[in-house]
Amino acid sequence: MIDSLVTAFRAPDIRRKILFTLGILFIFRVLTNVPVPNVNQTQLANLFNSNQLLGLLDLFSGGGLATASIIGMGVNPYINASIIMQLMQGVVPSLGELAREGEYGRNKINQYTRLLTVPLAFAQGYGFSLILQRAGVLPAAPFFSFQTLSLLMSFTAGTILLMWLGELISERGLGNGISFIIFAGIVGRIPHQAAPVATGPDGLLRILPFILISIVVIAGVVFINEGQRRIPVQYASRVRGRRMYQGQTQYLPLKVTMAGVIPIIFALSILAFPAQIALYFTTSSIGWVKSVAEFISQNLNGQNNIPAYGALYFILVVFFTYFYTAFQFRPDQTADYLRKNGGFIPGIRPGRPTEQFLSRVTNRITLGGALFLAGLAVLPLIVSAAIPGTANLRLGGTSMLIVVSVVVETMKQLEAQMLMRHYEGFIR
């Protein structure tokens, strides 16, 4: 990989893309350290140490949420808008047809995603401002006050700015811009999380097992993330105009982890949301309401009740892996597409039998991917419980998947561009 980077850096056009990407990432890291006014940093640190949902949101803001910076919302609203649009494609027929119209359809869906990001950023910024005010991080103020409105405008503008920077990386830089921004935020937080553990007593003995486990997990993530089931598809001879094209064999690749990191995000959100709501009722004057709220806040917490939290977390990740895969891959549409284009799976009749075969294969490989994702998600809980003093090192399932996926996809794109340059002399 190092040799590939050195060779790529020698090419002027690729070097410009790499330097442009690094420059945008530098701007992003600078913006994460520009806080909004009137922030109580002590109360802010206490809030994030006791709130799992904010920790998840901070992951996608690159640490900007934990510092209450002007880009505190990060790309969270854009990711939420993208997820909503993907889910709506399976529900709204017009959006599904638009997604199949090639580049024009993708551009229109991207435009709708950007428009949806703005109200989501405003609403999410308002919710975050309420949490900060109730926790004593910011002074309390009414909604129509200058303080609240300026705060919401700052958060919304910060999200739009990051979305624009991400698109600049995608157009003029290297790799996917939004993924690179999340990647930079995760990597940038590692020294901050590891410093208290490494500098403490017996720090080396505590951090060394974590490093070894991380290496094994990264290897597993690469292996599973690149794993796929290749189903052979045979196309019959076709006549176009006056030419006859002989039948050919292609492959339909079915990835083991079609859903990617989305199931972990959904599971964390489902687990964290009831606990966050319950916190508001722990001071209730009604006895049974207070008891229920205290039970939920204590048991749906990755710090207080690890066994119950981990078991529920595992089950939810498996469930959402199947749920999201059902939206990502439609066996009926794939079978219909193969039938219309004269393709068939050897030994399987076109139509309904092909759909049943694809459903059966998808369910089997999704089981392996779901168990892997669920195990990867609860691994940080197991490690933090087994190795005392490493609770801050939560470089777990979501972070590992994002980091490894971005590195692998970027290296693939880099090698593809180098290969294209290698063959340019033959093309000319």
Image: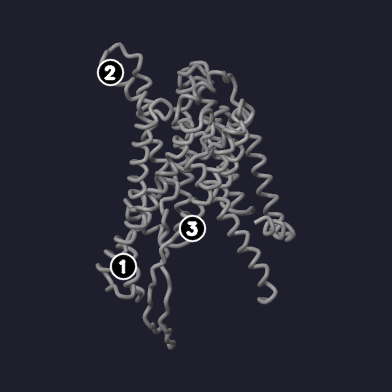
Query: Which is nearer the eye, 155 or 324?
Result: 324
Q: Which residue is mark 3?
A: 226
Q: Nearer the viewer, mark 2 or mark 3?
A: 3
Find numbered disc 1 in the image and state the secondary structure of the residue it sits on: helix
Q: Residue 339 at x, y = what percent?
A: 32, 72
**Crowdedness near tag 3: few (<14), some (14–19) or many (≥20) residues, C-alpha within 10 Å:** few
Q: Amino acid at mark 1?
A: Asp
Q: Which residue is mark 1?
A: 336
Q: Is residue 78 left or right of residue 267?
A: right
Q: Is residue 314 left or right of residue 128?
A: left
Question: Closer to the N terminus: mark 1 or mark 3?
Answer: 3
Q: Residue 190 at x, y = what percent?
A: 59, 36
Residue 124 in view here? yes
Question: Closer to the N terminus: mark 2 or mark 1?
Answer: 2
Q: CA distance from mark 2 to mark 1?
A: 53 Å
Find numbered disc 2 in the image and state the secondary structure of the residue it sits on: helix
Q: Residue 362 at x, y = what percent?
A: 34, 59
Find numbered disc 3 in the image and state the secondary structure of the residue it sits on: helix
Q: Seen from this angle, which residue lies furthest bottom?
A: 242
Up/down of 95 relative to 119, above or below: below
> Looking at the image, how many numbered discs can be counted on the residues?
3
Q: Which residue is mark 2?
A: 289
Name the residue located 61 percent from the left edge and 38 percent from the top edge: 188
Q: Amino acid at mark 3?
A: Glu
Which quadrant: the N terminus? Answer: bottom right
Q: Nearer the viewer, mark 2 or mark 1?
A: 2
Q: Is residue 22 left or right of residue 353?
A: right
Question: Closer to the N terminus: mark 2 or mark 3?
Answer: 3
Q: CA distance from mark 1 to mark 3?
A: 27 Å
Please report contact status of discs 1 and 3: CB closer than 8 Å, yes or no.
Answer: no
Name the residue located 45 percent from the left edge and 35 percent from the top edge: 381
